Image: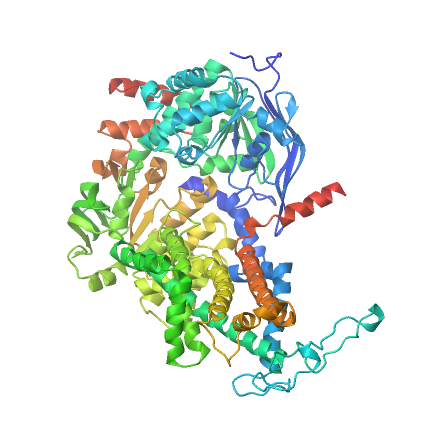
Amino acid sequence: MKTPSENPAAPVLSFADLSVTFDTEFGDVDAVKKLSLDVKPGEVVALVGESGSGKSVTSTAAMGLLPHNAHITGAASVGESNVVGLPEEQVRRLRATNVAMVFQEPMTALNPVLSVERQMTEALELHDLAYGQDAVDRAVELLEQVGIPDPKRRIKQYPHQFSGGQRQRIVIAMAISCNPDIIIADEPTTALDVTVQAEILDLLRRLKDDLGTGILLITHNMGVVADMADRVAVMFRGDLVETGTVEDVLTKPQHPYTQKLLEAVPRLRHADEALASAGRSGAAEADRRLVLEAKNLVLEYDMRGHKFRAVEDVSFDVASNEILGIVGESGSGKSTIAKAVLGLLPVASGTLSVQGEDLVTLPPKKAKAVRRRIGVVFQDPAASLNPRFPIGDCITEPMVIHRVGTRKERLDRAAELLDAVRLPRTVLNRYPHELSGGQRQRISIARALTLKPELLIADEPTSALDVSVQASVLEMIAELQAEYEFACLFVSHDLAVVDLLAHHVVVMKDGRTVEQGPTSTVLHAPQEDYTKRLLAAAPVPHPGEQRDRREARRKLLREQGLRID
Amino acid sequence: MSTMNDQKTPSSGDVYSLAEAEDARLIKEDAESLSQGQLIRRRFLHHKAAMVSVGVLVFITVMAFSSIGFAGLPGWWGKTYLDAGTVIDGGRPTLSLIPTWLGGDGIRWGEYPFGQENTGKDYFALVMRGTQKSILIAVIVGAVATCIGAIIGAVAGYFRGWVDSILMRVTDLFIVIPLLVLAAVLGQIAGNLGSSIVYLALVLGLVTWTGLARLVRGEILSLREREFVSAAQSMGSSSGRIIFKHLLPNTIGVIVVNATFAIAGAILLETSLSYLGFGVVAPESSLGLLISEYQNSFTNRPWLFWWPGVIIVAIALSVNFIGDGLRDAFDPRQTQKRSKKRKAKANA
């Protein structure tokens, strides 16, 4: 093992007065302002911030990968050498041997047409570390180290033959292949499910201890910070607003921005809190007015002739003024249910009725009339509004489709809805690209409410948003529901968000219901093993508490007889 | 949810919440709201090569239509392309652009600026007539091919399944038959329908839509997975509305850029057809026809070959540059100009 530096206390990565300005069509944009930060060997420094804070720009500067319109001053040093202003060829030699990167999206970080073997040996051969069979042996060793079972056989396979978590493990194996002094991990677990995230974090922690590399962890997830980091640096709009040990920053934040950020993080309530508020179950059981009811629902995707069953025998109901949360990991079929309710996917068998009318047997014309009573909010704020429609047209579109009202009435309704989602009326003539993600998501909510729906389908409405923005959007959904009394089907992967909003919860895995019932029971006194594992894997933004939870999770996994990495 | 309510009241002048900062910016911003279309227009107007090309194209068009008149309207040029006359000075062009103080004949237009052909017809009038035809063909072919291509591509891409299979096999069929052969046969049939060039243009439009159809289909295939399309579907929008209101406007970049290239292609296709004798026939005039008729004069009377040639190249090039400009305007990521400016600034 290579020693990172002669002097063990010398930082492996350090930024000194780093400023990055982008020269864009709309003038100069200061992305990073005078940032100074050190990462020592064997240390995990978390760089935290919301979008536009400049955290990714900082890390990209260290890799020397900023685009040509970036103007960089100050220093970003990897070991002894300052990357800023260094010729391309020398920066290239630094990569992988001195500084390596783990990206957010493991599918796109690996080349789908090359076998894992080819991709892993490439870095070794490029940097003169090993050739031919030696390189392959080394690659197998690395895969073993990151916990890929049966690496000798599997190294011949292609990226699509691995699961998301395994792919991220391979990316990590590639990152450590040349024994870098520092690994920059840019949102390494954001694209992964929470149980997989916990495993990847375990792996990173173990590797850091074994190899003594420093890790610069870029993330927006405070739970991940609490789980991994030794020190935390908080960025806000290009400024470093606070640095300190993880205990100090997360438990005693000094800067108002950090305080607000931590307040906005949704947390699972403690069991006693939850039981105290158990009365929060919407309308009393007796006078529940059912809006949506699914019985033995089966949904299938048609994959070029052969059927793939995405949802198997799921039953649930939602009454007005109630929120039903559907939680599960990717591939659990939770979004498929939302699609079926919206009529984007035919129902294979079972019933799906809105206010007593079965959408499955209803003729298309009538089904369309029924769907008028359903509003929808999708996940991706960048894609859910037509970029060529001004906001006013986006909001009034449902009225145009269903031929409701005159032009004036439609515009009045749009203005009314903008007030409801607390946006200025002047945005009516603006275009989606001029608005931020959170604002666009509020426009989506306004559009969903245009025809005063009885049912709102929210498919991961906040998972693409920043923490503080997510908080305001969730609050808005709750407020609007209190006002308009619609029923809401809330699909999410985030247990804390569901705990905050939902009255009832359905936990799904592989297209089947694992557990369902009132939120206080399912999320705070779970009966099923899977629910317990899911709850244990979600990290909380408190280092001490998270350490206890980590131990509790290990214990739980042992009890359930599962492999611990 | 008490934790969330706290953040609505900013404690001091500094705003430390991303959501609030964004909202404040939105309210404060009184700058003119630019739609994507306006942004694209602005970028296009700043594209030098494209703007020069627009100038050249407008000049040629105005010249061609105003000089000898069009559709019964008289023009400012006295001669017509049909009247033969006596050949003066071997039909040499009288146009001169070199001033006397540079040793030339001075700037003058003269009696026969582009010269005369062998029967003494005014070559300027002939070339202008040919240019009219070429531009007319270009516009009609561009419009017809774009409409057919965009609609077939959009329908195939949106519905997928058997609709897609049938439409795309038809497209393949058109692609495998050599364009020139197809256009020649159909052009001959169109010629029998009537002497008007419009029929030929329509026929050319009917066979040149294939490339655009494939491009639009590809674009629509990825667009239809975007959530705004799902949102429109779940609101109960009809397929027609989704295709024409949501999908096609978002492929406008591909469509416009391709239309310009299709126009340039159509001019050259007409030229080749007329050159081969399948397109426009004498006594009508077309740039391709003029070249084919006078190719043998290249050695002794080169202007008979040069004038139509130069105009074909000028039109095709300027239309291509306009296409380039439009592509850069629709996809500003491809241009690297700004970084050069920054480097120049850094060096200074």
Residue drawn at the location 54% of the way across and 42% of the way down: A52
- Which quadrant is the C terminus of chain A positioned in? top left
Extreme residue in the right direction = B101
The answer to whether any part of residue A146 appears in the image is yes
Q: Where is residue B245 in the image (x, y as percent from the top left)?
A: 39, 64
Which image quadrant is residue A157 in? Answer: top left
Q: Is residue B250 above or below residue B143?
A: above
Left or right: B89, with B230 as reference point: right
Q: Nearer the viewer, residue B212 or A16?
A: B212
Q: Where is residue A502 in the image (x, y as percent from the top left)?
A: 30, 42
Q: Is residue A123 above or below residue A462?
A: above
Left or right: A190, with B29 as reference point: left
Q: What is the basis of the colouring in this image?
A: rainbow
Q: In this view, does A238 lie above or below A171?
A: below
Which image quadrant is residue B315 in? Answer: bottom right
Q: Position of residue A414 (x, y in %)?
A: 42, 63
Residue drawn at the location 40% of the way across and 52% of the way down: A384
Q: Which of B230 and A268 is in front in this view?
A: B230
Question: How many numbered badges does the structure rendering display?
Answer: 0
Q: Nearer the viewer, residue A106 or B166?
A: B166
The answer to whether any part of residue A525 appears in the image is no
Q: Where is residue B61 in the image (x, y as percent from the top left)?
A: 58, 74
Residue drawn at the location 65% of the way across and 70% of the way down: B300
Q: Nearer the viewer, residue B38 or A214?
A: B38
Residue drawn at the location 48% of the way across and 15% of the way down: A211
